[in-house]
Amino acid sequence: MIFAALLWSIVLLVPQKYGNMSVQSKLSYESSNLERWETLTHGLEMWQQSPVLGVGLGVFNEKSPMWAGHPQVIHSTPLWILAEFGLLGGAVFGWTFFLLAHHAIRSGTTQPANCILLLLLVAFAVFSLAHEIFYQRILWLVLGAVLTRPYAHRRHA
């Protein structure tokens, strides 16, 4: 945590001290970053239109060609859920997330399947802040495998 704070201090202070320095990555272009910010801005605007129930599934993708020129997704899963499903959908999703984490912790973190489940949830939480991860098949494949693991050793009578 201290290292991260120190690193961000350097990133924020160095350009001020040495003039107009760019911190743009060579892996992406500024236009890509601007498009990402636009999806977040428009996602917040949609959520403000209908904060409780959201605007409905697929509405963002349907309306995005008006400002982006092509269909686009919100580059943040939590914001996408809030924009299209509202606080109600966010609460359902958050409750499900909580129940999965609670199950893994309650069942014991000494079992590999529970550790994998917790790591998967942490990875999902972090990755989903800057990406739309709901459509990543590997997430659902690993989640399904981990959740069915306790039943794998049972024999049928």
Image (spheres, rainbow, N blue to C red):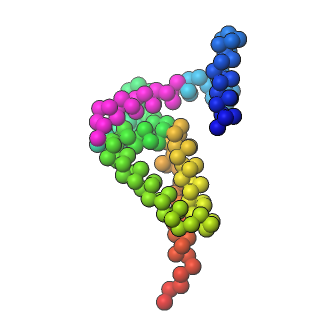
* Dominant secondary structure of the residues highlighted in magenta in the image: helix
Quadrant in the rendering for residue 145: bottom right
Residue 150 pos. (x, y %): 54, 73
* Side (left or right) of 84 relative to 33: left
The vertical placement of 69 against 18, above or below, is: below
- Residue sitting nearer the eye, 106 or 115: 106
Residue, far bottom: 157
Tell me the quadrant of the picture where the N terminus can be found. top right
Question: Does the magenta-highlighted stretch encompass residue 123?
Answer: no
Instruction: Give the residue displayed 36% in from the left and 29% down from the top.
Output: 45
- Residue sitting nearer the eye, 65 or 110: 110
- Residue sitting nearer the eye, 133 or 150: 150
Residue, far front: 2
Q: Is residue 119 visible?
A: yes
Instruction: Give the residue displayed 33% in from the left and 42% down from the top.
Output: 86
- Please state the total of marks drawn on the protein image: 0
The vertical placement of 14 against 49, above or below, is: above
The vertical placement of 93 against 132, above or below, is: below
Residue 111 pos. (x, y %): 61, 68
The vertical placement of 21 against 31, above or below, is: above
Residue 151 pos. (x, y %): 52, 75
Residue 26 pos. (x, y %): 69, 27
Question: Does the magenta-highlighted stretch encompass residue 47?
Answer: yes
Instruction: Give the residue displayed 56% in from the left and 43% down from the top.
Output: 127
- Residue sitting nearer the eye, 75 or 72: 75
Instruction: Give the residue displayed 34% in from the left and 35% down from the top.
Output: 47
Numbered range of the magenta stretch: 34-52
* Side (left or right) of 43 relative to 112: left
Q: Is residue 145 visible?
A: no
